[in-house]
Amino acid sequence: MSKAEDSSNNFFVIEPIEMSSESEPEELEDLDDLNDIKHEEDNLFYIFSVLINIIQLNYLDRDKRIMDQIKS
């Protein structure tokens, strides 16, 4: 939207602008890009959660071995 200054009251009036049909596919491409980014974020979140679980399991296994050594 464009802004035009109203000199009588010294405030801005928002004037609507006409949308061309050429801008619509670009907006759709932007939405596709946003969806792709969202899927990438979801994938990264899943990968990091799996890595964290593996690290936790390794520490649990290590702690279990240490406790077994202490008991014997």
Image (cartoon, grey):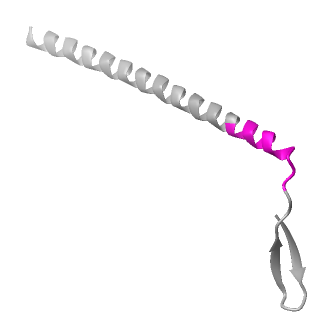
Q: Residue furthest bottom?
A: 8
Is 21 within the magenta?
yes
Q: Indicate whether 22 appears above or below 38.
A: below
Q: Measuring 56% from the left and 32% from the top, which residue is drawn there?
A: 41
Occupied quadrant, residue 53? top left
Q: Position of residue 37 (x, y in %)?
A: 63, 33
Q: Position of residue 21 (x, y in %)?
A: 85, 46
Asked whether 65 or 44 is in front, the reply is 44
Occupied quadrant, residue 67? top left
**What secondary structure predominates along the stretch shown in magenta?**
helix
Q: Measuring 82% from the left and 78% from the top, which residue is drawn there?
A: 13
Q: Measuring 49% from the left and 30% from the top, which residue is drawn there?
A: 45
- The quadrant the N terminus occupies is bottom right
Q: Which residues are magenta?
A: 19-31
**Is 39 displayed left or right of 69 in the figure?**
right
**Is 41 displayed left or right of 21 in the figure?**
left
- The quadrant the C terminus occupies is top left
Q: Position of residue 10 (x, y in %)?
A: 84, 87
Q: Indicate whether 9 appears above or below 24.
A: below
